[in-house]
């Protein structure tokens, strides 16, 4: 809940310094009304600096941040947050309230810390196995989903289709 933020006009150097000081790999980008408008990661900053051939202090967050940010709602369950992360292959979700106002951030680390080893009636359903699957599916190179395979003469595939969830 103690969320660090940056604005699109901030330098990448200040955003990366904030990440270093707070021990995190991403910072939500907010507008003047605290609404989520982007997300910048340490990797985004490095890739932007390399592609532009400039130093971090000469670049703005707006040049590197992701704009179509995957978010979850403050009322969502941990299971929903885990599913959104897994389907969209992200390790961090800004948590938003009405009109995309930032109220927190939930990460893979946060979910791992709240794993229940004995899942009962009152449990969240997040097991060590589900966290391991989430880690595996959000690690490595992000890939585009494959189109469903269609067999000749068949109208639809028996494979489920999972669409990415975009809030906003």
Image: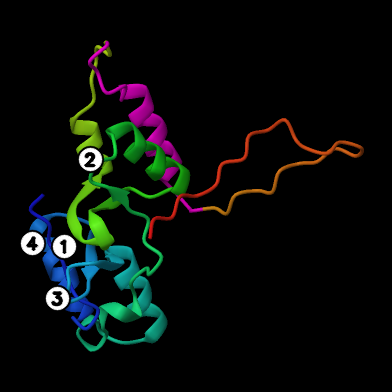
Of pointers 3 and 2, the one earlier in the residue sequence: 3
Residue 159 is drawn in which quadrant?
top right
Cα separation, mark 2 vs mark 4, equals 17 Å
Q: Residue at x 12, y 57 (%)?
A: 3
- 3 and 2 marks in contact (CB < 8 Å): no
Residue 112 placement (x, y as % from top left): 24, 32
Residue 124 lies in the magenta stretch: yes
Find numbered disc 4 in the image and state the secondary structure of the residue it sits on: helix
Q: Which mark is residue 109?
A: 2
Looking at the rendering, the stretch of residues picked out in magenta corresponds to 121-142
Labels 2 and 1 touching (C-beta < 8 A): no
Asked if disc 1 and disc 3 are in contact, CB closer than 8 Å, the reply is: no
Q: Is residue 41 magenta?
A: no
Query: Which label lies toward us, 2 or 4?
Result: 2
Indicate which disc, 1 or 3, sits on the residue closer to the N terminus.
3
Q: Residues within 10 Å of mark 4 (few under 14, many from 20)?
A: few
* x 22%, y 40%: residue: 109
Q: Which residue lies under the disc numbered 4?
A: 21
Q: Which residue is disc 3 drawn over?
A: 14
């Amino acid at each position: 809940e103690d969320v660090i933020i940056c604005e699109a006009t901030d330098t990448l150097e200040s955003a990366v310094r904030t990440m270093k000081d707070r021990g995190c790999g991403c910072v939500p980008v907010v507008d003047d009304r605290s609404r989520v408008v982007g997300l910048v990661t340490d990797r985004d900053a490095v890739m932007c600096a390399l592609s532009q051939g400039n130093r971090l202090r000469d670049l703005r967050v707006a040049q590197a941040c992701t704009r179509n940010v995957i978010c979850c709602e403050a009322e969502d369950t941990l299971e929903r947050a885990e599913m959104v992360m897994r389907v969209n292959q992200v390790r961090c979700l800004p948590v938003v309230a009405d009109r995309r106002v930032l109220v927190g951030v939930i990460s893979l680390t946060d979910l791992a810390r709240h794993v229940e080893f004995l899942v009962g009636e009152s449990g969240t359903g997040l097991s060590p196995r589900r966290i391991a699957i989430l880690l595996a599916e959000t690690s490595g190179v992000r890939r585009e989903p494959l189109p469903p395979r269609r067999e000749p003469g068949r109208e639809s595939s028996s494979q489920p289709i999972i669409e990415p969830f975009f809030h906003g």
